[in-house]
Amino acid sequence: MKFIYPLYAILLLFVTSCTEVITLELDTASQKPVIDATLNASTGICKVVLTKTGGFYQKTDFDKISNAIVSLVDGNGLRYNLSEISTGIYEVGNIKVQPGNNFTLTIENVEGKTYKAEALTPYPGKAVEISKQLFANPGTDTLPSYFTSLLIEDFPEVKNYYQVKSYINGKFQASIFDFTGDEWFDGYTVEFPSSAVVYEGDTMVLELISMDKVMYQYVLEMSENLELAYNPKTNFDGDVFGRFGIFYSDSKEIKL
């Protein structure tokens, strides 16, 4: 097995400014459907959340879209029908998924319209172990802090896309986005650092998400444009926001 240590490919850029806040009247735009659709290849569960866009400043409580007809079909024509388990949330399990499988998601009866998207199942990487490195040890008044890294075993000879999610004491670190493709380490095992800082006594979980190209590009663009009125390119046909993506999940845990 080939090894490379370390892979430090994530740079953070922070820009601050002092400006007067001006609130514009931007709440009157027409609503459009938003489709958050994923197939978890590790669990065999497909989940679709249907909402509508809100006002420009709206952050929560988006209108849900109910009574849609949602189906998933694999490359062999096997069909799975999703049930509406709660308002605007559709789900089905026990899906047979293999790397390289193609799936088509169809959503009908969305205000009289139908939307369709295709996605290709990725080949999963493997989370091997978590390592730690002392960041600061100021003495007895403050606990020592650490950076952690996840050792990733890349699936060889195919294009792979990864996100490493950080959880500290069971809480997902939503403001941290750690992404990479395997352009520089195809088939190798590499050490991928998390941007999170953890303290002595914390429990850190690093989750490796192996995703298809469409999902990778979508979440990467979203993370880079959190403060902008920007919508990444969708793989659904029609005038709609969102995406359909397929991913595998693997994780490791360490007590600091």
Image (spheres, rainbow, N blue to C red):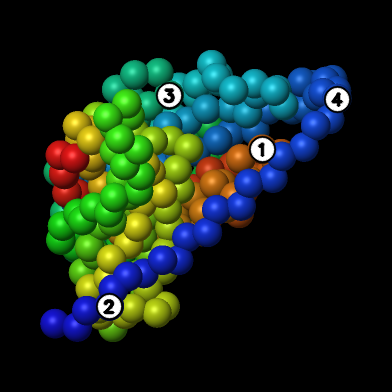
Residue on which disc 4 sits: 20
Amino acid found under the numbered disc labelled 4:
Glu
Instruction: Classify mark 3: residues with Cα within 10 Å, few (<14), some (14-19) or many (20+).
Output: some
Instruction: Please identify the quadrant where the N terminus is shown.
Output: bottom left
Q: Is residue 245 visible?
A: no
Q: Is residue 54 left or right of residue 114?
A: right
Residue on which disc 3 sits: 88
Between the residue at mark 1 and the residue at mark 3, the CA separation in whole angstroms equals 26 Å
Nearest to N terminus: mark 1 or mark 3: 3
Residue on which disc 2 sits: 4
Amino acid found under the numbered disc labelled 2:
Ile
Query: Residue 227's mark?
Result: 1
Cβ–Cβ under 8 Å for marks 4 and 3: no
Amino acid found under the numbered disc labelled 1:
Glu
Between the residue at mark 4 and the residue at mark 1, the CA separation in whole angstroms equals 16 Å
Q: Is residue 183 left or right of residue 168?
A: right
Nearest to N terminus: mark 3 or mark 2: 2
> Who's the residue at 32% across and 26% down the image?
141
The local secondary structure at tag 1 comes to loop
The local secondary structure at tag 3 comes to loop
Instruction: Please identify the quadrant where the C terminus is shown.
Output: top left
The local secondary structure at tag 2 comes to strand
